[in-house]
Image (tube, helix red, strand yellow):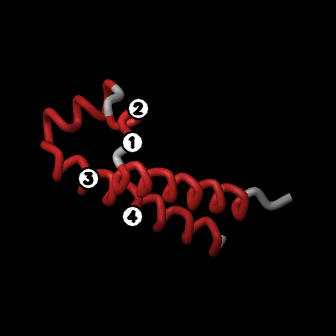
């Protein structure tokens, strides 16, 4: 069985979750300890940009997994 397409779909689901968190900023998730630390270190806008960069990296990974 080829696991790469399944891993790619999981990457795309994770991308959706990360982008949703960055855009909607749900209070329960936005106030978690790690996100608070990022907000303190990078600022509000920097944290959102970091989330989008992280999603872009996982997009590249997901597309790469689909091409294997």
User: Cα distance, mark 4 to mark 1?
Assistant: 21 Å
User: Cα distance, mark 4 to mark 2?
Assistant: 24 Å
Work out whether mark 3 precedes mark 2 in sequence or the reverse, and give the earlier one.
Answer: 2
Judging depth in this view, the residue of 8 and 49 nearest the camera is 49
> Residue 6: which quarter of the image?
bottom right
The answer to whether the residue labelled 4 contacts the one labelled 3, judged by CB atoms less than 8 Å apart, is: no
Work out whether mark 3 precedes mark 1 in sequence or the reverse, and give the earlier one.
Answer: 1
| Residue 19 drawn at (x, y percent) | 41, 57
- Residue receiving disc 3: 48
Res. 26 mark: 1
For the N terminus, the image quarter is: bottom right
User: Cα distance, mark 3 to mark 1?
Assistant: 13 Å
| Residue 5 drawn at (x, y percent) | 71, 64
1 lies left or right of 67: right
Work out whether mark 4 precedes mark 3 in sequence or the reverse, and give the earlier one.
Answer: 3
Question: Nearer the viewer's eye, disc 4 or disc 1?
Answer: 1
| Residue 14 drawn at (x, y percent) | 54, 52
User: Cα distance, mark 4 to mark 3?
Assistant: 12 Å
Can you name the residue that lies furthest to the right here? 1
User: Cα distance, mark 2 to mark 1?
Assistant: 6 Å
Question: Nearer the viewer's eye, disc 3 or disc 1?
Answer: 1
8 lies left or right of 27: right
The answer to whether the residue labelled 2 contacts the one labelled 1, judged by CB atoms less than 8 Å apart, is: yes
Can you name the residue that lies furthest to the bottom here? 67
The residue at the point 41 percent across, 58 percent down is 55
The answer to whether the residue labelled 3 contacts the one labelled 2, judged by CB atoms less than 8 Å apart, is: no
Q: Residues within 10 Å of mark 3 (few under 14, many from 20)?
A: many
Q: Is residue 64 above or below residue 55?
A: below
Res. 28 mark: 2
């Amino acid at each position: 069985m080829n696991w790469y397409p399944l891993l790619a779909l999981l990457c795309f689901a994770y991308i959706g979750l990360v982008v949703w968190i960055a855009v909607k900023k749900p209070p329960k998730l936005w106030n978690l300890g790690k996100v608070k630390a990022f907000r303190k270190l990078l600022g509000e806008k920097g944290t959102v940009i970091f989330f989008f960069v992280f999603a872009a990296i996982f997009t590249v990974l997901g597309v790469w997994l689909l091409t294997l």
